[in-house]
Amino acid sequence: MGGIPGCSRPEDVDSLRRVTLREHMTDMGRRARAASRALSSLSSDEKNRCLLAMAAAVEGAAGDLMKANALDLEVGRSLGLSSAMMDRLALTGERIHGMASSLREVAGLPDPVGRVLDERTRPNGLRLTKVAVPVGVIVIIYESRPNVTSEAASLCFKTGNATILRGGKEAMNSNRLIAGLLAGAGRTALGDHFPSDAIQLVTTSDREAVTELLALTEYVDLCMPRGGEGLIRAVTAASRVPVIKHYKGVCHVYVDAQADLGMAELIVENAKCQRPSTCNAAETLLVDRAVAESFLPCVASRLAGRGVEFHTDAASLAGVRWGVGNRPNVVRLACEEDWGTEYNALVLNVAVVDGVDGAMDHIARHGSGHSDAIVTRDEAVAGRFLAGVDSAAVYWNASTRFTDGFEFGMGAEIGISTDKVGARGPMGLEELCSYKWIARGTGQLRG
């Protein structure tokens, strides 16, 4: 039997929705491709003028940004977001100032586009030059952190890449305002010469929009997801365009027998507690058996005072359970799953290992290839660790919290890649460039 006249069946409505989404995403991709061509005509000076205008616009709208973010925080609470996600969602005055500072720093960095990467002249006189060029159109998919809107757009803009931004529904108010401020400032700086579609924001929360967007191989050159492991795996599975991945940050600090133990305490505290919701925060402390008895009670007391909960192996349980003054800490024995968990919270795994080889074995089994550190005064041991740990960033006597584009002098970062092919670690301007070969001849023909 037929349906009620004038009414659509649910499957028809869903089909119409998909068609509308596909058309909308295709239009965004087409406009981004056109904008990427227009961006290639902008000089470094013009791009920098835009970025400085964007910084001023963000700083000048701090009050409006705080109001928009307050609405997002209400949405986040209604969605039951974790404390780590709520921390990432929040915009404070300091973070807004940080966005503006990052825009200014990106403006002050050398333009990587046009860099000569290689030059050679062949025996037949053909002159070859390898030159850095923009990737083209980059899709950024991210959760919670509205400052990513500014960071990603600024880095893509500086490198001549058009960007399509798709944040989470929990940050929609903040993201809309930030994207609007950036585009408006660009138009103010360059007038009609500014390619308005260079920075676009997907404003629907429909998840199918991502699937449609990542099918646009004709228009989209690269996707970079930023968020939890679940988001990144889902994007990778759905995408038909290349994806640069960062699944999770299971970072380690290893305290060697030859460590300055006072320094080690401070490094572990910073790596775990300075901002535990970030991907470069330490999730596991490894301690050489030779110093475990003296070091663990001291570091456990320091961290317990910061509210840290401990998941330990059997060898470290006693040393961590009781802090200085026999004060009990929050401790339980770790299960196998804990060693590969990114907590993004004040939770720390603790294990006793047999020297640097034991530490490297543990990291090889459970690490995510993000950031790992050794604390030691022994240069030879440090050298073995730095050479033997296969992560995007390895540290000697420093906190893992430095794995960050701003801290690495990149101005900002568009993500931290744990891939081994292509970009790895914090991705700044140079990592957002491809290259092409330019050949100059005098009539050479191949025989």
Image (cartoon, rainbow, N blue to C red):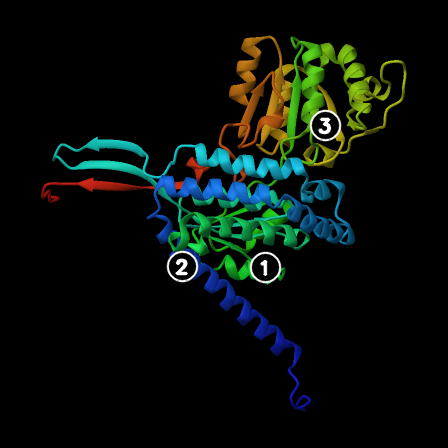
Residue located at (65% from left, 33% from top): 250
Residue located at (63% from left, 22% from top): 399
Image position, residue 11 (x, y; %): 63, 76
The quadrant of the picture occupied by the C terminus is top left
Instruction: Tell me the distance, in whole angstroms, between the alpha carbons under discs 1 and 2.
Output: 22 Å
Image position, residue 95 (x, y; %): 64, 37
Q: Are marks 1 and 3 in contact (CB under 8 Å)?
A: no
Considering only order in the chain, which callout, 2 or 3, is on the residue closer to the N terminus? 2
Image position, residue 327 (x, y; %): 90, 19
Question: Which amino acid, by three-letter code, is at mark 2?
Answer: Glu
Can residue 84 be seen in this snapshot? yes
Q: Nearer the viewer, mark 3 or mark 2?
A: 3
* Residue at numbered disc 2: 218
Image position, residue 73 (x, y; %): 73, 49
Image vertical order of residue 258 relative to residue 153, above or below: above
* Residue at numbered disc 1: 203
Dividing the picture into quarters, in which one does residue 88 lie?
A: top right
Q: Which mark is residue 181?
A: none
Question: Which amino acid, by three-letter code, is at mark 1?
Answer: Thr
Q: Nearer the viewer, residue 175 or 404?
A: 175
Dividing the picture into quarters, in which one does residue 382 lie?
A: top right
Would residue 120 be found to the left or right of residue 186 on screen? left
Circle 2 sits in a helix, a strand or a loop, which is it? loop
Image vertical order of residue 95 relative to residue 348, above or below: below
Considering only order in the chain, which callout, 2 or 1, is on the residue closer to the N terminus? 1
* Residue at numbered disc 3: 273
